[in-house]
Image (cartoon, rainbow, N blue to C red):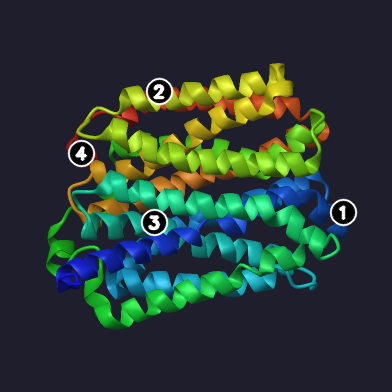
Amino acid sequence: MTSLPRPRRAAVAAVVAVLLLGMCLRAPVTAVGPLIDRIGADTGLGPTALGLLGALPVLGFGVGSVLAHRPAVRFGLERVIAVALLALAAALVVRSLPVPGALWLGTAVIGLAIAAGNVLAPAVVKRDQPHRIALVTACFTAVMTTTAAVASGIAVPVSDAWGGGWRQPLAGFAVVVGVVAVIWGVRAVRAGPATAPDPPAAVSAGPPAVTMWRSRSAWLVSLFMGLQSASFYILVNWLPTIEASLGLDLRTAGWHLFVYQVVGMLSGFGVTVLMRRRTDLRGLGVAVGLCMTVAMVGLLLAPGIAVVWVVLAAVASGSSLVLALSLFGLRTAHARETAQLSSMAQAIGYVVAACGPLVAGWIGGTVAWELVLVLTAVIALAQAVVALGAGRPGLVLDR
């Protein structure tokens, strides 16, 4: 058997590394949802505090997104990603320690560490696979959501195996993250600091970072990112609780969350077919927002067929994520701009998204969990409206 040429091997290795990174970017968050009632019972936290706990990593995504770009320019993409993964592994252990404040500290650091991967993965894809952005992004999100789905699905069974404890299931994933951190560390040593989004000359010659913040189109892309993320994190944190309030048992609700993420992964691949050779993405953006709206209304009015509405919501969510992440590369001219737009969009987007679980926890805990479905439907409608601007063809710095 003939081996692949060196450039081909390097390209394959780069894609595999990105996919392994994707494994680590959602499971530490999605495993919490099915266990959130057990966390509350063990720690004494009420619905509002648990909502804040669910929002904290998403807030970390927003704050960390602002911080990730400059170190990547200075030290290189691989080095920053490797350090972030090491911090993530440590934070997973800290979060599960039976020490006062460890739950909050670990959760906050988890959000900050994941933010680096969120921001820099699109820049790596833009740099290494500029002609396959949508496809590689779909593969990246597929791995990310599959791992997240498995974490959600097995959280309660693993917890039951540990006598109902929540700490062991949440800490165990640190082993996986640690292995991936070593892989990225090896890549960082081999690559050196020259793998920043662009070489130093391009950095000095390119447009200043502030230009992105003055672009109306960049703001619309950021809002699209935030609104679709808000829907996702509301459901990933509270769907089991919402379904339990509608009469489903907790184990079934946990597997519905698994279905939500697996179908979302498959939908991410499907939407790349519709995106192929298409420069105007407004129609797709509107369609996925309306699908989520219908799913939330259906779950509210006909909970007896909840799995149908969960599948429809998953189609909308998975498609929205691939569309949002692909816009970072499709709407920018080079990897440095991609990192800038990714940083801006995820900083704004995740601050918007963080409000979702927090407000949902307060509404569900003090009023009714059914109203959380109404909230998510309204967010999805707003996403459809924003898509009319975010999905327009062209580069964000050209308009």
Give the crowd class for mark 2: few <14, some 14-19, many >=20 residues within 10 Å: many
Q: CA distance from mark 4 to mark 3?
A: 19 Å
Dot 4 amino acid type: Leu
The residue tagged 4 is: 395
Sequence-earlier tag: 4 or 3: 3
The label nearer to you, 4 versus 1, is 1
Relative to residue 397, is residue 89 depicted above or below? below
Residue located 72% across and 48% down the image: 34
Image location of residue 25, percent across then percent down:
50, 58
Q: How many marks?
A: 4
Q: Which mark is residue 41?
A: 1
Distance from the alpha carbon under mark 4 to that under mark 2: 20 Å
Distance from disc 4 to disc 1, alpha carbons, whole Å, reads 50 Å
* Residue matched to label 3: 119
Q: Is residue 38 left or right of residue 295?
A: right
Vertical order, 177 against 158 (above or below): below
Q: Is disc 1 placed on a helix, strand or loop?
A: helix
Residue at the limit of the structure toward the front, as seen here: 1
Q: Does dot 2 land on a helix, a strand or a loop? A: helix
Residue 294 picture quarter: top right
Q: Residues within 10 Å of mark 4 (few under 14, many from 20)?
A: some
Q: Is residue 229 something that shows in the picture?
A: no
- How far apart marks 1 and 3 lie (CA) works out to 35 Å
In the depicted view, which residue is nearer to us: 6 or 317? 6
Reading the chain from its start, which is encountered first: label 4 or label 2? 2
Q: Is label 1 or label 3 in front?
A: 1
N-terminal label among 3 and 2: 3
Using the image, tell me which numbered label, if any, was put on residue 286: 2
Mark-to-mark CA distance, 3 and 2: 25 Å
Answer left or right for 7 relative to 339: left
